[in-house]
Each structure stands twice: as structure tokens, then as C-alpha cells.
Amino acid sequence: MASKATRLRALALYKELHRLGRDYEPSYDFHGKLRRLFEKNRNLTDDEEIEKALRLGEYIKNETLALYSLRKYRYLKRMYPPNSTSDA
Amino acid sequence: MRPSAVRLLNILVPIKRAVDYAVKIRVNPEQTGIDLNVKHSMNPFDEIAVEEAVRIRERLKDAVKSIKVVTIGPPKSAETLRTALAMGADSAVHVEILESAPAPEPLGVAKALKALIERQKEGVDVVIMGKQAIDDDAGQTGQMLAGLMGWSQATFASKVEVDPEQKIANITREIDGGLEELRCKLPVIITTDLRQVHLLNEPRYASLPNIMKAKKKPVEKLTAAELGVDLTPRLETIKVTEPLKRVGGGKVANVDELLTKLKEAGVTGKRA
């Protein structure tokens, strides 16, 4: 960890991803994978490598959010189809 | 230069802490209701309502004075309020009921909301709420509230545009076979729906920093008694059962077998 700023960013990212992982499919072991990936990168010193790792974390966060919204959207669309009250 | 006297909008968003959409619903052993010892979260239609209120403010900017969210529920409902505050609401009201109390009915909720609106010194111009809760699917509260208040209503809204200067709202509604456009005078009750192609809006994710910031936003605690409302249910649920299990179909090898099975099932036919 090169500086205090990146350390704080990494911690914030970890907390955010950890919170997101609570709703994930349990068999995937989101929390386990999260911890291992972060630990693998704990000794990075090069600024560019750190940036790359943080960007990957952000990307995974956005992907997970997208998966969740899609799952919820699909459920709502299935449960409340358009014009289901029509007798036509 | 003095600012023009445009009336600033106060938006109220009632929300409900309901059984989470992903939970597999089970009827309780006494057959009086469903197992409530499961994950709860904000009713998805109410998420859309909160998001719509925040987007109205993003569009109208300073013309929106406040976005207040309200919920009627047990102590745990405070978390749901916190999520709405994290999404962008300014303040919240928690009408607290006992953990053991029966769930309030739509008419009770509507009466409580009416009492709350009447308490607001600055008035309420727009009420936006979900069209129905995914646990009871009643879909009545918005309409009842509009009736009690004598306000205009636009239900199943898939598009909302508020004009504070004209004091109207142009709302597109989902109806059988298409869309209907309404122009409503403020104050108005709007209930939010999904659009045919996509959601009315995509509710934003309440990030952890926003949730932390939301802890500082004011939450007013009230009781039904303070609002002068009785939330005792007027309906008695006699029995709750699961729908009949779908019996699998079977395949037949040929027409003769089909005829045999039809005869066994009691289907008789006469030659034309």
C-alpha cells in the first residue's frame, strides 16, 4: 500500500464489496473470494498496479450491482406482467 | 433582483418494509399467514417512488423544497427509512407500531397518512408511492388516500412531469391496452408502476457512505395515537393456504392411449 489515500480507498472498496456480497448466491463464496483477492494484492507498491487493482474492484462492484438490479427487474416483470388484468 | 414567488414543492413518499422479493414464501403452520421470520426490504415499487422523487428534484432543482419519507411499521422499519434517506430523501417520519402488532391495513395506512399530511405546516404538494406492496398486493392505499383527501390521483404512473409554476403534473399511466396521459392539479397522489419496456426509473443503489451520511438526517418518531388514528384491523383473516401444487402432465405414446386416458378421466364423446 503506497499511501494513506490509497489505503483508505482500498478499505472503503472492501467494505462496500463485503456489504454487496451478502445477497450473492452463497455457494459462490463471494466473501471468501473477496478476502483472498484483496490479500493477494496487499503488498503492492507500484502506483499504477494499485490503481489497476482498485479499478478492477470498482468494476466488480458495478457488475454485481447490475446483476442484482437485473435479477430484481426480471422478478418484477414476471410477477407483474404488463396488462395482466386485461380480459381481452 | 428578488426571486419570484414560486411555491416550493414538498414531496411525501410513503414506503413500506415488506418481505424481500427473493424470499421463498411459506405459509405458517397455523395457516393464519405467511412466515415473517425472513428477510425484509423496501417494497420495490416504493423504491421506484423514492427514486422518482429524487429525480423530480434533479430536474426541478430548487423548486423542490423537501422530500420526506414516511413508514408505518415496527422498530426494524427504521432501516428502510435509512435506505430511502441514503437514496436522497431529506427527512423521515417513523410511525412506530409494536413488533407483535398486526400489519396495518390499507385504509388504516391511508388514514394515518392523511393525519400526517394535515400536520405538515408547510403542506404537501405531491405524494408518490408504490402502486402495491409485493407482500399483500392490495394496491389500495394510494387510491384511498386520494379519496380521503379529495385530491387528484394518477395511479400506475409510468412517467411523471411536475410543473410547479402551473401547479400541475402531467402523468402517463399504464392502462389495459396502452397508455393514458393525465394532467392533474396539485396536490396530487401518484402511485408508481413498471413501464412496459422498462422500469419507470432504475432505483439508485444506496452506497455505504450515503447510508452513513443518512444517519445524520432527521427521523421523527410518532405513534398512531398521536396521529389520532386507530390501526386495528377491520378484516379478519380466516385461513391462508398455499396454492394447489401443479400436477405434472404425462406423455402418451399414441392416439389409442390418449383415448384410453381420456375415458379414464371421465371425458366421454359422441360421434358427430
Image (tube, coloured by chain):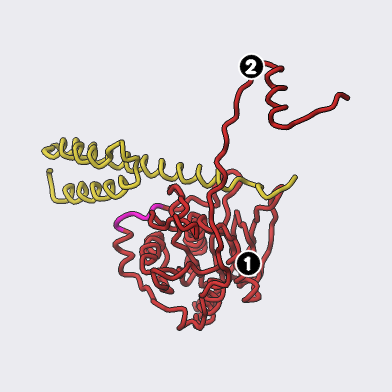
Chain colours: A yellow, B red
Q: Position of residue B212 (x, y in %)?
A: 29, 62
Seen at 63% across and 76% down, the residue is B148
Alpha carbon separation for disc pair 2 and 1: 54 Å
Question: The disc labelled 2 sits on which kind of residue?
Answer: Ala
Q: Which label sits on residue A16?
A: none
In this view of the protein, which residue sits in the foreground, B13 or B42? Answer: B42
Q: Which residue is mark 2?
A: B253
Locate the N terminus of chain A and report the quarter of the image it occupies: top left
Discs 2, 1: same chain? yes
Seen at 65% across and 47% down, the residue is A84
Q: Position of residue B80 (x, y in %)?
A: 40, 62
Chain designation of label 1: B
* B207 in the magenta segment: yes
User: Magenta part mainly helix, strand or loop?
Assistant: loop
Question: The disc labelled 1 sits on which kind of residue?
Answer: Gln
Q: Which residue is mark 1?
A: B143
Q: Position of residue B85 (x, y in %)?
A: 39, 64
